[in-house]
Structures are given as C-alpha cells and as structure tokens.
Amino acid sequence: MGDDHKHDHEHPDHSQLGEMQARVRALESILTEKGYVDRSTLDLIVDTYETKVGPRNGARIVARSWTDPEFKARLLSDATAAANSLGFPNPVGAHLIAVENTPQTHNLVVCTLCSCYPWEVLGLPPVWYKSAPYRSRAVIEPRAVLAEFGVELPENTRIRVWDSTAETRFLVLPMRPPGTEGWSEQRLADLVTRDSMIGAGLVRGP
Amino acid sequence: MNSIHDMGGMHGFGRVEREVNEPVFHAPWEGRVMALYRALGFLQFWTIDGGRAAIESLPPQTYLTASYYARWLMGLERSLARSGIVGADEIAAGRSLRPARSHPHIMTASDVANLQRGNFERPTASPARFKPGERVRTLNLNPETHTRLPRYARDKEGLVEAVHGCHVFPDTAAIGAGENPQWLYTVVFTGRQLWGADADPTLSVSIEAFEPYLAPV
C-alpha cells in the first residue's frame, strides 16, 4: 500500500472530482440558505489562504532574526509577540514557539494526531505534512525521513522532534547559510524555504 | 480514542512523497471546505476539539482512503448533524428542509481581516504540579473519547521542559464536558525511552502534555 494509493486519492479522477464539487456546493447552499455562512466571506477566506497567508511571512521572521539579535532573542522568548511586531496583514495568534537549529541540534515539527501547523506564518500545510508516512515516521525515524528530503545531518547532531499535540505551534528557526554575510533582510528571506521552517529542509547558501 | 489518526510510530505507510510547486488547494471544493470549516468554527456550535473528534471517529478505513479535505468535509457533516445545524436528511436531500436555529453574528469580511487562532489559555485556578527539570511518567490512558496523549507516549518516563500556563482541556471540551482548563507542559522523551534500545541515540521527541496525563516519578 502507500504511494500509488495515496496518489490516487490526492488526485482523484474527474468523476470523483465532480462528485466532491457537487457535494460541497450542496452543503454550502444549505448553509447559505439557512444564514449560517455568507458566500462572499467564504470567497475571502479562500483568497486569504491562497494569496495573503503563507510561508513568506515565516521567511521574514527568520531573516529578521538572522540580522537582528535583539529580535531573535524576543522571538525565542515570545514568538507570537515578536512575529506581530513585523505587522503581517493577519495577526499571529497565541502560543507560537520558535525553536532554533544549531550545529548541535536539529528541530523537526510534526503533528502525529492530525495536522497542527503554524498557519499564520507558514500558510496551510502541504499534503506530505498531513500524510500518514510523515505523521507515522517523523517521531520514530526522523533521519530516514530527512534523507528523503535530501537532508543528511552529521551522525552526532541531536534531532529533536516536536509533536504538536496541543494548541502551541512551532516554527523552526533554521541556520543561516554561510556566504550570506552582509546580505539584506529581503535577500535572506528569499533563501528561506517553507520546509526549512518545519525542519524538513536546510537553508542553502548562494 | 485509539483509532487510525494516532499514527506516531506506525510502520508500513511508505515514503514521504513531496509535490513540487504544490498548489494551496488541489481543487476548488477543497478551498470551499476549508472556508466552511473556518466560518462555521466562528459560530462556536462546537469546539476545535469536538471538530477533531468528529474526524477521528470516522471509520479507520474511511480515514485512510479519503483525502485530507474529504475527511474535513465528512467531519463537518457529522458536527453539523450532531449540533442540529444541518440534519443528515438535509445533507442527503442536498437542500434545506427546516428553518435555521437561532445563531449569533455570522462571520463577515472584517472578521476575515482579523482572522487568527483562538487563544486557548485560561486563568489558573491552582499552582502547576510540575516544574521544568522534573521527571514525570505519562499515564496509561485509553479513553474511547478524544484525547491528545498519543499512544506512543503513554506510560513513558520523560522530563518536563517547559510550562505553558493553563489551557482548555481537549479531553473534556471535545465531549461537551466543559473547558476544564489544565496546566500544559512540554515533556521530552529520549528515543530510547519511547522506542527501546535500538532507537536512534541522537533522537529526542517532545509532546505537549496536559497535567492529567502526567504522574510524578
């Protein structure tokens, strides 16, 4: 089981797709008719997650912490407050926790029970983050998982996995790559990948 | 609930497959389900934990074969039926068969502009039982209802690393038994404590554990 199976249900054929569209449209109609939801609000929510809230927000946080030690200290003590000081279009809610990668320790975030993820700074999670392979394996064989992401860590690097089992949310602060001395915050932010802020990637230098 | 959603440490699911240039939604209906979920969550007919419980209680074979947003849709339909908002008969008919229940202010554009996570921290009623640096043992709990103590971390010795204040207790909130706020801790285990002698010696894993999950060592 596994890969082929997953491929099928993440990319259903056209008849399944049509069936889901119809089923969701019917539910939306019932809820609109009863006055529980408003269509234009739903449009706006979709647009917010497609265009406004995403990993570029997290990348700004990371780049700022690489260039501003005082910001980094605030981020590591209260990530919600530090993130909100950057003035994102949508505010960051309670209990964001930033965890710092160092040469000694690599952090990796998972939600084994569902799909908890720091939406406000990374956007909606990718399919792999919500998938059974990642949720099952990240806590027992993170090195093998990281290898599949092309991340090979030194043998003696400690790996710390954070299972998001409550309403706290985790953002990994990746290591700044060498060769970026003197770079602007914007240029640094462009290097920061979503996966590196989950711990499933490293930020590569120029 | 000991069901298939509790996946930590399971074998056999294969490689983690990444999609290059993955879109936020793979079909328009996925975005609509996400938006419905948020807009209905706003009305607070059920709690975030009740919503999760509705998804976890899908039959395991359904949970495994449905895509992520299909699970959300099925969870939503269950929550709607259970709360009397939209009956199973109306979902089957594809149209409204009864007038709406009275409901508070529905979500509007200005609410979307201020969309942020709910804050689940609550005032403390009693001092925290454990301090950072203390050893604890997770209890061997197997409730048939919602819990956030994963199976792989039950009856295991670990170390309290951080205390996060008192938070809504999912185990009671999910079943309509109230917020019942409890102290929340980061508890860290070594790979060997969780997985035995053959575990990666460089591994440690933490969970966010509510006080009723923990006993002193």
Image (spheres, grey):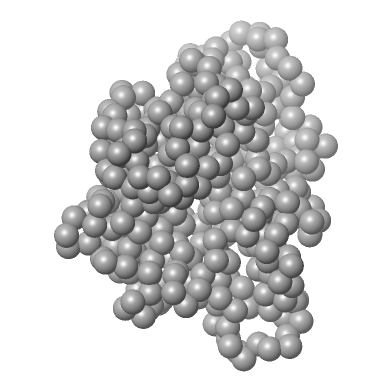
Q: Position of residue B181 (x, y in %)?
A: 54, 25
A33 left or right, relative to B187: right
Q: Residue at x 29, y 29 (%)?
A: B141
Q: Residue at x 16, y 60 (%)?
A: B197
A111 left or right, relative to B180: left
- Is residue A20 at least partly visible in the picture? no
Along the line of sight, the residue nearer the viewer: A118 or A5: A118
A77 left or right, relative to A18: right
- Label tally: 0
Q: Quadrant of residue A187?
A: bottom right
Q: Position of residue A13 (x, y in %)?
A: 41, 51
Quadrant housing the N terminus of chain B:
top left
Along the line of sight, the residue nearer the viewer: A39 or B6: B6
The vertical placement of B18 against B109, above or below, is below
Q: Position of residue A194 (x, y in %)?
A: 57, 66
Q: Position of residue B105 (x, y in %)?
A: 77, 21
Q: Residue at x 37, y 55 (%)?
A: B205
The vertical placement of B62 against B9, above or below, is above
The vertical placement of B161 against A146, above or below, is above
B133 left or right, relative to B142: right
Along the line of sight, the residue nearer the viewer: A17 or A31: A31
Q: Quadrant of residue A74?
A: bottom right
Along the line of sight, the residue nearer the viewer: A142 or A154: A154
As drawn, the residue found furthest toward the left would be B197
Quadrant housing the C terminus of chain B:
top left
Q: Residue at x 41, y 35 (%)?
A: B148
- Is residue B201 at least partly visible in the picture? yes
Q: Quadrant of residue B149?
A: top left
